[in-house]
Amino acid sequence: MPDAAPSRGTRRPLARQFLIWQLVVVVLLLAAVAVLAAAQSDAAFRETQGRRMLSVAEDVAATPGIRAGLVERNVDLLATFARSAENLSGADRIVVVDANRVVRSSPDPAELGSPFDPGESTAFAGRAWTGAAGRTVVAEVPVVVEGGQVVGVVSAGIRAPTLLEALAPARGEVAALLGLALALGVGGSLLLARRVRRQTLGLEPAEIVELVQRREAMLLGVKEGVVGLDPDGRITLLNRPAVDLLPGAHLGDRVDDLALDARLRDVLTGRVRGEDQVVVHSGRVLVLNRNPLDAGAVVTLRDRTELTTLQDWLDASRSLTDTLRAQAHEFTNRLHTIAGLTELGEHDEVRRFVSGVVAAAEGWRREVADRVAEPAAAALLVAKASLATERGVELRFSPDARLAAADDPALGRDLVTVLGNLVDNALDAAPGGWVEIGLSDGGNAVCVRVRDSGPGVASELAEEVFRHGFTTKAAESPGGRGLGLALVREVCLRRGGSVAVEGSTFTAVLG
């Protein structure tokens, strides 16, 4: 899509569009008013002139000369009285018809002697009738002689004026009204166009459409997830990465109605504020930033799962390095001790010292091998022993700790994640103290319980430590990210288990 703004010369400006449409509306409105006025005027004309023509026809039918002319079949006498009545009454035409329905007098000489079509008229039956023949209002009255005999019919008619003829007397008023309407339409269009342009920052409609399309294409094309929300927390924009990061979310859904983690809902709706909010959702580590707007908010989501995985690998390497360093440091100290005893000639003491060291190391390895049949977990606990020794922490099992080998390799990997994070947190929380590890695998679930001699977690933070990636090391260690317990919770929930803390005891269940 081109970045240049659309050419203003190739599109009709907003003011001109408003003017044209306003003129169209005014013309249509005036036309509708004219048609309505014409219809009302025509109806009033027919009603008024119908009564008038009936009165004219009755007066002519009651004239003795008309009666005599019909009885004597004197056409000239009928024509004289009929033309005189036309001139006096203002009727357009007065027609006299005899009892045989033959025209005996008419303004049109071609009609004389021709048959007369009464249509729906009841005049030949002795009753007066009014109606219309096209645009002509007609009234027909029977001519009755003594004895009640109908000897003929008098028809009086007047033509209704057309729309232009009806408006001709008020031509000046109509022109003034049309000019006033056009002036109001033009002025209103210009004012409306100015107001709209001020509210749209001077952009024309085509430019606004193109700008919206370009912005939407940019939002939908970015690799980060973008979620648009209205003030009610309803999703109005959702690009492809956001759909992948928030499965089950659709346009029009309310965030509070979605099956999302409570922490994620709080960040999306703005109940939790701040930059770079870290959330663990569906096994992914997401970083959210919420930007409030007048029309809602825009939330960006970045998937930091791969980066977090690399950081975890780095932490594992660092932990292994620390373990090897601790072992090397411990081994060096022991060598120095043995060398010193040898130089002093304390050979018996050397033998006792070596036997004690071997017995201590072999004792922990043997206990781990006896209690933990899962290879990955056993190797992890053996490696943690050297780190615990360097920090002066006693690492021990609870009396009933037992763990069989896992049939599912994924369970072994998840167990290492949970056990490693809980043991690391315990070693950091109890320097110079002790850490007790409890393991059990009854009822198709593995239970991990880690207890230490540290101060424990306050009861009001029992949920916060898991929901917000709580850490006590953030101010001390640049590597502390506070994701360890959040990952433990995510792993447990993914496997249908749970995790909880009470004081200094963490209990995790993996299904």
Image (cartoon, rainbow, N blue to C red):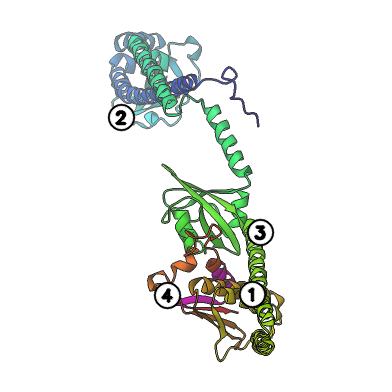
Camera-side residue: 69 or 137? Answer: 137
Could you tell me the amino acid type at mark 3?
Leu
* Residue range corresponding to the magenta coloring: 488-505
Residue 150 in view: yes
CA gap, disc 2 and disc 1: 152 Å
Q: Secondary structure at mark 4?
A: loop
Q: Quick check: 465 left or right of 406? A: left
Does the magenta portion include 498? yes
- Element type at mark 2: loop
Q: Position of residue 280 (x, y in %)?
A: 55, 62
Distance from the alpha carbon under mark 3 to that under mark 2: 121 Å
Q: Name the residue tied to disc 4.
A: 455
Mark 2 and mark 1 lie on one chain; the one further toward the N terminus is 2
Q: Amino acid at mark 1?
A: Asn
Mark 3 or 4: in front is 4
How much space separates mark 4 and mark 1, taking CA atoms? Answer: 31 Å
Q: Which residue is the site of mark 3?
A: 310
